[in-house]
């Protein structure tokens, strides 16, 4: 009897230990069945004019077979205060899913490795469903300066499925990395020029891999790589400071009522041509906008409209769409083959100084949430992406991406439809409450097993 009691005590301790591992990263908030947690990236340090472009491997992330309902992030200081864009410009953040072979060990949060690390067979990128080939946007999630005021929730009954054991290659583990590209613009000579990564302000002639810049390359990602320095006003001084990416993930446990969506990221710089379907989808990610001339101003009001036609091999029902643009952007539109508007996404510019409303910066992008079934893309349909920028002045290193979530099917009329994510009540349960609840559940489970064992012994059965 003492041996049996000791066995159950060990069983309960193991269960409680498992719970502590699951919840030690961050408290979990429950919103009518939708879970959420807030995590912090490793600390990065910036001084006036400096740049970080870090890759953090094996970041904290919800575990298990789940459906992501929302993912967003922002830059905060060591006290947890949001940092305004006019002090630290968030060029972009992206979160990439990858599979790492179990035999490989890399230090957690190793920021010295870039995407090139995935060239070896020990690492496999879990790409989104987008068209861009190697080198293009591979992320599941990602935004830029607009991150605070751009909706990212996935409406019910849809979700982004992750953690399905059937999708993880044999011998590999499911992991996530975050790339953070931030520029400290305190005291710089030209704030817009620094955020647009103009090469003359950074005084660089090589990219982050030591390769010479191509002739005519005026600005962009190659000039503001990690540890570069934008020109600061002579005599300006300010202290270094530690910053973090604070990211919030919302999810639900996977179940048969959830309809999975595919993530497509379309790039207006894609070089694919319909006339030659063997052409690869080489996405350049960034491009320049030339300042307009007097003739341009008379004809089109100084608007630079870049467009591309792309064929989506597998279609479905559009659930969500949003564009990504940089300062100077005035909106982007995704058209169907027949000219219908699938989504028109426009930027919101700030008007003040506080975080989330910084004057002159894009602080949000409008999103499209069509009624399920009302916007459908056919298999093989040719889509057109148009990205519009003001060309009243020139811009370097701008982007024209379009994120769309597409579902293969519609919910059945008799499907259980949970309450939409943005209408859930907020209930915070501290670890101690989770531990007590779990301990109570474990005691109940133990009581059931003890009752069954006693019944089996009374009826002459031998338990296995």
Image (cartoon, helix red, strand yellow):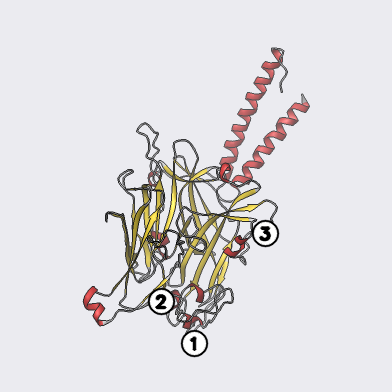
In this view, 408 is above or below 225: above
Left or right, 346 with respect to 56, comes to: left
Residue at position x 65%, y 24% from top? 449
Q: Which residue is mark 1?
A: 234
Residue 263 screen position, x and y as percent: 44, 52
Q: How many marks?
A: 3
- Judged by depth in the image, the label closer to the viewer, 1 or 3, is 3
Q: Taking 458 as reference, is 58 above or below it?
A: below
Q: Give the secondary structure at mark 2.
A: helix
Describe the element under mark 1 as helix, strand or loop: loop
The answer to which of marks 2 and 1 sits earlier in the sequence is: 2
Answer with left or right where residue 405 lies relative to residue 463. left
Residue linked to disc 2: 192
Residue 307 lies in what quarter of the image? bottom left
What residue is drawn where x is 66% and y is 42%? 17
User: Does 427 sit above or below residue 50?
Assistant: above
Task: Judge whether 273 appears above or below 406 on screen.
Answer: below
- Whether residue 105 is visible: yes
Mark 3 element type? loop
Label number found at residue 106? 3
Q: Out of 109 and 19, give the one closest to the viewer.
A: 109
Q: For the residues marked 1 and 3, what is the alpha-carbon distance in whole angstroms?
A: 41 Å
* Residue 98 picture location, percent across and down: 57, 54
Mark 3 Cα shell of 10 Å, populated few (<14), some (14-19), many (≥20): few
User: Disc number at residue 31?
Assistant: none
């Amino acid at each position: 009897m003492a041996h049996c009691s000791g066995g159950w005590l060990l069983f309960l301790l193991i269960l409680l230990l498992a719970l502590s591992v699951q919840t030690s990263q961050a408290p979990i908030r429950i919103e009518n069945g939708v879970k959420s947690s807030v995590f912090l990236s490793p600390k990065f340090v910036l001084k006036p004019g400096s740049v970080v472009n870090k890759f953090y491997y094996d970041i904290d992330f919800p575990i298990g077979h789940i459906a992501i309902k929302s993912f967003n992030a922002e830059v905060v200081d060591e006290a947890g205060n949001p940092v305004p864009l006019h002090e630290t410009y968030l060029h972009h953040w992206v979160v990439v899913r990858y599979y790492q072979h179990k035999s490989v060990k890399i230090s957690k949060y190793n920021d010295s490795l870039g995407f090139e690390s995935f060239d070896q067979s020990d690492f496999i990128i879990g790409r989104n469903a987008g068209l861009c080939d190697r080198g293009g946007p591979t992320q599941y999630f990602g935004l830029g300066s607009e991150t605070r005021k751009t909706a990212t929730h996935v409406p019910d009954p849809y979700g982004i499925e992750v953690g399905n054991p059937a999708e993880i290659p044999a011998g590999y583990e499911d992991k996530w990395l975050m790339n953070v590209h931030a520029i400290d613009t305190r005291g710089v000579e030209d704030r817009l020029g620094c955020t647009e990564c103009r090469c003359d302000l950074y005084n660089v002639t090589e990219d982050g891999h030591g390769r010479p810049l191509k002739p005519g390359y005026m600005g962009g990602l190659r000039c503001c790589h990690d540890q570069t320095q934008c020109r600061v006003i002579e005599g300006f001084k300010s202290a270094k400071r530690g910053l973090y990416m604070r990211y919030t993930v919302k999810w639900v446990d996977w179940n048969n009522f959830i309809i999975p969506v595919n993530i497509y990221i379309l790039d207006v710089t894609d070089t694919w041509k319909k006339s030659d379907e063997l052409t690869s989808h080489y996405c350049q990610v960034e491009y320049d906008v030339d300042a307009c001339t007097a003739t341009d101003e008379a004809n089109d009001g100084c608007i630079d409209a870049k467009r591309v036609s792309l064929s989506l091999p597998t279609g479905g029902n559009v659930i969500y769409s949003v564009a990504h643009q940089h300062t100077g952007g005035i909106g982007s539109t995704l058209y169907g083959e027949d000219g219908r508007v699938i989504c028109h996404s426009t930027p919101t510019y700030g008007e003040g100084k506080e975080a989330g409303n910084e004057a002159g910066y894009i602080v949000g992008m409008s999103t499209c949430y069509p009624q399920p079934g009302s916007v459908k893309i056919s298999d093989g349909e040719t889509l057109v992406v148009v990205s519009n920028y003001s060309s009243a002045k020139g811009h370097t290193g701008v982007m024209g991406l379009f994120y769309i979530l597409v579902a293969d099917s519609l919910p059945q009329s008799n499907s259980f439809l949970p309450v939409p994510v943005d209408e859930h009540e907020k209930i915070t349960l501290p670890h101690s409450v989770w531990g007590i609840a779990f301990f109570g559940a474990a005691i109940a489970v133990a009581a059931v097993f003890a009752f069954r064992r006693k019944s089996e012994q009374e009826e002459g059965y031998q338990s296995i």
